[in-house]
Image: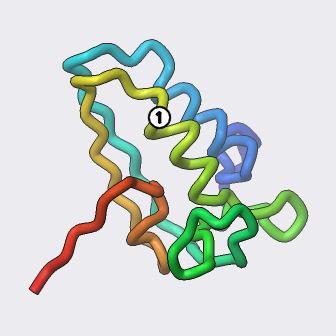
Amino acid sequence: EETDPFKRPTKHNIRMAIYWLVQGCQPGDSLVFHYSGHGSQQRNYNGDEVDGYDETLLPLDFETQGMIVDDEINETLVRPLPRGARLHALIDACHSGTVLDLPYLCRMG
């Protein structure tokens, strides 16, 4: 078990890691975001989800601190990127297909 409190995947630490990743990002930069863990859904209250549910990531302390909602992920990880920067997001979690809240979908088949 991880004993360094700054390396534990708490909501605060995940948020801080996202802020660290995007700060100072310039056109031409290529960023990698990787998350392997639990994902879920919760009822959407602002009306921006077609299916009525926000996708979420569940940090270690989600039961006391709450989930990280797709709206927040988009606002802190996607929107700050300047035009010409690339984000490679590898998300291994349930309900992660639209967790970045991107304005388009990939339709396969």
Residue 17 placement: quadrant:
top right
Q: Residue at x 54, y 26 (%)?
A: 20
Judge the density around disc 1: few (<14), some (14-19), many (≥20) Cα neighbours within 10 Å. Answer: few
State the image coordinates of residue 61 (x, y, percent, origin top left): 79, 62
Name the residue rendered at 40%, 27% in the picture.
Answer: 81
**Secondary element at image label 1:** loop
Q: What amino acid type should be assigned to the residue bearing mark 1?
A: Arg
Give the image's coloring scheme: rainbow
| In the image, residue 100 above or below residue 5 | below
Residue at far left of view: 109
Report x, y in % for residue 24: 44, 13
Q: Position of residue 46 (x, y in %)?
A: 71, 62
The reply, left or right, for residue 24 in relation to residue 9 is left
> Which image quarter is the C terminus in?
bottom left
**From the image, which quarter does the N terminus lie in?**
bottom right
Q: Nearer the viewer, residue 42 or 18?
A: 42
Q: Quick check: 60 left or right of 33? A: right
**Furthest residue to the bottom?**
109
Q: Is residue 2 above or below residue 32?
A: below
Rendered location of residue 52, percent (x, y): 61, 79
Question: Which residue position holds label 1?
Answer: 79
In the image, taking residue 89 as reference, residue 51 lies left or right, namely right
Image point (49%, 78%), residue name: 95
